[in-house]
Amino acid sequence: MGSLLLRWLLNALALLAVAYLYPGVRVESFFAAAMAALALGLANALIRPILVLLTLPVTIITLGLFLFVINAALFWLVAQVIQGFAVQGFLAALVGSILYSLITLAVSWLVTGAKK
């Protein structure tokens, strides 16, 4: 339970970092970042597998590049639902989702690498 809470807080900080690094993504407060990180986690756990399955032929044809579109769509969807978290269009959602993925990957790697 503690590692889940830590991961959630680190993802919220990663979302704040994305907003700091890229002007197309705006986060008004840490609370908004925490709620958006929670919503992104739920969307990735519940909605993403369905979208991946439904778009499997397109994903195969594009050699997996369509997964970037799915990630951007979920990032944009969460921005539409959570107040205090805004994305300025699909290109901003694409860049924001890529930055968010890279930052969370790096932070996760640093945290799990520090335990070993």
Image (spheres, grey):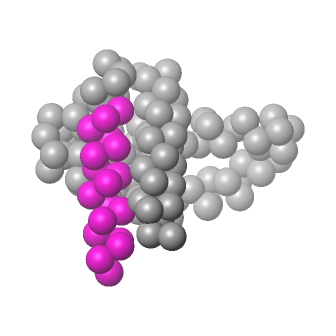
Tell me the quadrant of the picture where the N terminus can be found: bottom left
- Residue 11 on image: x %, y %: 35, 52
- Residue 64 on image: x %, y %: 76, 42
Does the magenta stretch mainly form a helix, a strand or a loop?
A: helix
User: In screen coordinates, is 65 left or right of 74?
Assistant: right
Q: Is residue 90 above or below residue 71?
A: above
* Magenta span contains residue 92: no
> Residue at 60% of width from left, 36% of height from top?
69
Total numbered labels: 0
Q: Is residue 8 above or below residue 84?
A: below
User: In screen coordinates, is 3 left or right of 90?
Assistant: left
Q: Is residue 18 visible?
A: yes
Q: Is residue 2 above or below residue 52?
A: below
Q: Is residue 8 above or below residue 66?
A: below
> Residue at 49% of width from left, 46% of height from top?
106
The furthest residue to the bottom: 1
Q: Is residue 97 visible?
A: no
Quarter of the figure with residue 39: bottom left
Front residue (pair 84, 113): 113
- Residue 35 on image: x %, y %: 24, 54
- Residue 13 on image: x %, y %: 28, 46
Q: From which residue to which does the magenta span run?
A: 1-18
The furthest residue to the right: 61
Front residue (pair 37, 11): 11
User: In screen coordinates, is 102 left or right of 64?
Assistant: left
> Residue at 52% of width from left, 35% of height from top?
98
* Magenta span contains residue 15: yes
Quarter of the figure with residue 52: bottom right
User: In screen coordinates, is 99 left or right of 83?
Assistant: right
